[in-house]
Image (cartoon, rainbow, N blue to C red):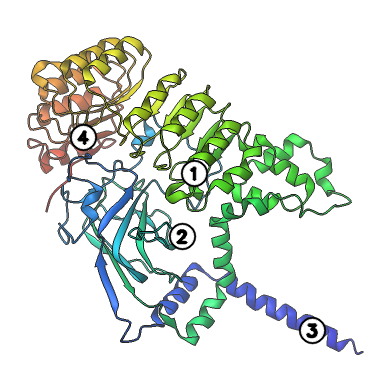
Amino acid sequence: MSPVFPMLTVLTMFYYMCLRRRARTATRGEIMNSHRTVESNSRTSPLNAEVVQYAKEVVDFSSHYGSENSMSYTMWNLAGVPNVFPSSGDFTQTAVFRTYGTWWDQCPSAPVPFERTPADFQSQDYVELAFEQQVYPTAVHVLETYHPGAVIRILACSANPYSPGPLAEVRWETLWSEKPTKVNASQARQFKPCIKQINFPTNLIRLEINSSLLDYYTELDAVVLHGTKDKPMLSLKTSLIDMNDLEEDDYEEKDECEMDNLSKTFSSTALREGPSNGYFDKLPYELIQLILNHLTLPDLCRLAQTCKLLNQHCCDPLQYIHLNLQPYWAKLNDTSLEFLQARCTLVQWLNLSWTGNRGFISVAGFSRFLKVCGSELVRLELSCSHFLNETCLEIISEMCPNLQDLNLSSCDKLPPQAFSHIAKLYGLKRLVLYRTKVEIEDYDVTASMIGAKCKKLQTLDLWRCKNITENGIAELASGCPLLEELDLGWCPTLQSSTGCFARLARQLPNLQKLFLTANRSVCDTDIEELACNCTRLRQLDILGTRMVSPASLRKLLESCKDLSLLDVSFCSQIDNRAVLELSASFPKVFIKKSFTQ
C-alpha cells in the first residue's frame, strides 16, 4: 500500500481536529452569538401561543429585610403584578434581601469562607417562585426597581409545586447564569437575560442572588415567566449551530451535577492495575495530599478514577476536613451522603446549607451520616435545610459534642420545642436562629441571662426583637463589656428618652458595628455620646431617625477615624446637600441615603 494514503489520513484527521479546536476555543462573544442564533431560530406554531404569567406565590427564600408578619420589604411582594415598576427608588412594597455589599463580611462575626468552593458558585441568597401554568420557558423577565444587578443565576425545576401526588424525579436546570457584575445605575430596569431552552415544562423558577458588588440594597418588584404549553420546535439550522457547543455544554453540566454520580465516581472496582505510578511514586504522601487540597470536590471525584494510588489519596479523610456541599444542593441526596460517609470521619467543618429539600435528604439519611461523621464536627451550616425536624436537632446534640458553630437560619419548619436540644451543646460559640420559630416570651429576661452568663460575648444580633426594652439593654451593656457588634435594628420598644443608647455608648467602648435602624427616637445626644466613647466604630446605621442633625454627624466623623459605613436614609434632617458636604469632607466614608422617586 502506498505511503501517500496513510499520510492523507493523518492530514485529514489533523485538519478535523483543528476545526474542532477552533470551534471549542471560540471567544465568549462568538459563543453568545451562537446561542442568540439558536434563540432567534426557535419556531412557535400559531396554536402554541406564548403564555405570559406573573408569579402566583413565593415558595421559599433564604432571607429578606422585612419581618415575618409584615409585607414591607419582604419576599412575598414578588407574587403577583408589579407594585412599583417602572418607578425607581426605595419602596416598602418590593422584595429586599437582608444584606448588600461586603459590609457584613467585614465584621468580626463574619464566618470564615469554606475552601474548595467552586469558582462558579457565588450565590448568596435565593428565592423560589411558583407560577400557575407549567410552560416551556422562552423568557424570564425580572423587574428591578432599585440598585439592579444582583441576579446571577436563574433555574427551572421539573417538579410542580401544585401537584397533589408525591413528587416524581426532581430536576433543576440552569436557564441562565453569569458572574456578579457591577451595574453603575441605581434606576429601575426590566432585566431580560437570554435563557436556554429546556426539555421539560416548569412552573417553578428560582433566582439566585449575589449582592456583593451593590452600593445598597437591591429591590425586586415582580418576575414574569414567558413560555409555551408545547415544546418549541427548532429549525435544522439551529440544530447544526447548537452542535458546535454540545461537548462544551455537556462538560459544564457534568461539572455542576457531579454529585449525582458519587457512587460511580468513588468506585474502586473500575480502576486497573498499573505497573507504575511514574513520578508520583517518588513524591511524599503529604506532598500529594497538599497538591490535591487545591481541587474542588468534583475534581477529586474525577481524579479518584484514574489509578489506585490517586484513588487512595482522593478517599483519604484528611481531604474532607472542611466539606462544603452547598454548591451541589440541586443534586445532593441520601445516596451522596452514604458514599461520602467513609471519607468524612474526620470532618470538622460541614456546610449543608440549601440542601436536602423536596425529599432529597431524609431524616434517616442525615442521622446515619452524623452518627458516623459528627464526632469531630466544630462547625455545621444548615441554612434553609427544610428536611430538618426535632429528631435531627436531637441527633446533632448527641453526635456532635465538639460543636462550636451552628447555623439554622431560615429553617422555618422546625417546631419551637425542637430548639430545647440546643441547650445540650455546651461548647457553642456562635448560634444563628434567624427566621426560625424559636419562642422567646421575654427578651429582657433573655438579655439579662446573656449579660450574666456571657461575659466574653463579642457579637449580638437582636434585629427585629419587638419587646426588648431599656432594662434588657442595660443588663447587656453592663454584663458584656467586650461587645464589638450590636444590631438593634427595628426594635420599636427602645426609646432614646430613657437614656439606653447613651448608656450603651458609655459602657461599650469596643463597639465597631452598631445598627439602630428605624428607631425614630435616636437623637443628637446619642450620636455625640458615640463620638466621645466609641472611637473604634466602623459601621453605624441610623436609618429613619428624625432627630439627628448634620452637626452631630460631623462630630462623629471627626472622632471615629475608622468609620467606613454610615446609613442616614430617611433621616429627615439630613438632606442630599448635607450628604454631599459630609462626603466631600470625609471621602473614605460611604454615606448611604436612599431615595424614593
- Crowding near pointer 2: few (<14 within 10 Å), some, many (20+)? few
Between circles 4 and 1, the one closer to the viewer is 1
- Crowding near pointer 3: few (<14 within 10 Å), some, many (20+)? few
Residue, disc 2: 168
What residue appears at the point 46 percent right and 49 percent down from the top-left corner? 359
What residue appears at the point 36 percent right and 40 percent down from the top-left corner? 102
Q: Secondary structure at mark 2?
A: loop
Q: Secondary structure at mark 4?
A: helix
How far is the residue under mark 1 from the one under mark 2? Answer: 16 Å
What amino acid does circle 1 point to?
Ser
What residue appears at the point 57 percent right and 66 percent down from the top-left corner? 250
In primary-sequence order, the first of circles 1 and 2 is: 2
Name the quarter where the C terminus is drawn: bottom left
- Tags 1 and 3 touching, CB below 8 Å: no
Q: Is residue 401 visible to the viewer in this orientation of the structure?
A: yes
Between circles 1 and 3, the one closer to the viewer is 1
What amino acid does circle 3 point to?
Thr
- Tags 2 and 4 touching, CB below 8 Å: no
| Residue 142 falls in image quadrant | bottom left
In primary-sequence order, the first of circles 1 and 3 is: 3
Residue, disc 3: 9
Name the quarter where the N terminus is drawn: bottom right
Q: Is residue 108 visible to the viewer in this orientation of the structure?
A: no
List the single residue furthest toward the right: 1
Residue, disc 4: 585
What amino acid does circle 4 point to?
Ser
* Location of residue 127 with respect to 377 vertically, above or below: below
How far is the residue under mark 3 from the one under mark 2? Answer: 50 Å
- Tags 4 and 1 touching, CB below 8 Å: no
Residue, disc 1: 362
List the single residue furthest toward the front: 165
